[in-house]
Image (tube, grey):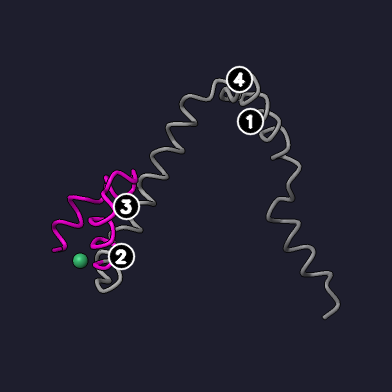
Amino acid sequence: MTCQEVADFLMDYLDGALSTETRAVFDHHLGVCRECRDYLSSYETTVALARSSQCDADDQNAPPPPAELIAAILSSRRAEAPAAPPDGSLAAESNSDPK
Ligand SMILES: [Zn+2]
């Protein structure tokens, strides 16, 4: 089996659709070919990501946060901003530091 054939059979391999003989040849090639092992693992990762993002899209139990909530969080952060010490207080602190 060549690397090209491995790539062609990859989806059938992951679906378990290969015959026992073909799967054995496939596994043997993976055992001796590092490139195809890397290709298989990156392919599996891609498939897993695609499936998980698809699940998120179908999940109606997790709606995005309402715009009102986001606006409330943002405005409360803005309200806190003036409480942060201005640059002058930092200088005053370092002046009173008894080093
Ligand atoms: Zn290969």
Looking at the image, is 27 positioned above or below residue 76? below
Looking at the image, is 7 positioned above or below residue 69? below
* Residue at which label 4 appears: 66
* Between discs 4 and 3, the one toward the N terminus: 3
* Residue at which label 3 appears: 43
Q: In which quarter of the image is ligand 1?
A: bottom left
Q: What element carries label 3?
A: helix
Magenta residues (range): 1-29
- On the picture, is 45 further left or further right than 62? left
- Residue type pointed to by label 2: Arg
Q: Which of marks 1 and 3 is in front?
A: 3
Q: Which of marks 4 and 3 is in front?
A: 3
- Residue type pointed to by label 1: Leu
Residue 57 is situated, as x and y percent measured from the top left of the image, at 46, 27
Q: Main secondary structure of the magenta part?
A: helix
Q: Quadrant of residue 71?
A: top right
Residue 70 is situated, as x and y percent measured from the top left of the image, at 61, 26
Q: Is residue 91 magenta?
A: no
- Residue type pointed to by label 3: Tyr
- In three-dimensional space, the C-alpha distance between marks 2 and 4, rounded to whole angstroms, equals 44 Å
* Between discs 2 and 3, the one toward the N terminus: 2
Q: Does the magenta stretch include residue 19?
A: yes
Q: Which mark is residue 37?
A: 2
- In three-dimensional space, the C-alpha distance between marks 1 and 3, rounded to whole angstroms, equals 40 Å
Q: In which quarter of the image is residue 25?
A: bottom left
Looking at the image, is 66 positioned above or below residue 9? above
* Label 4 beta carbon less than 8 Å to ligand 1: no
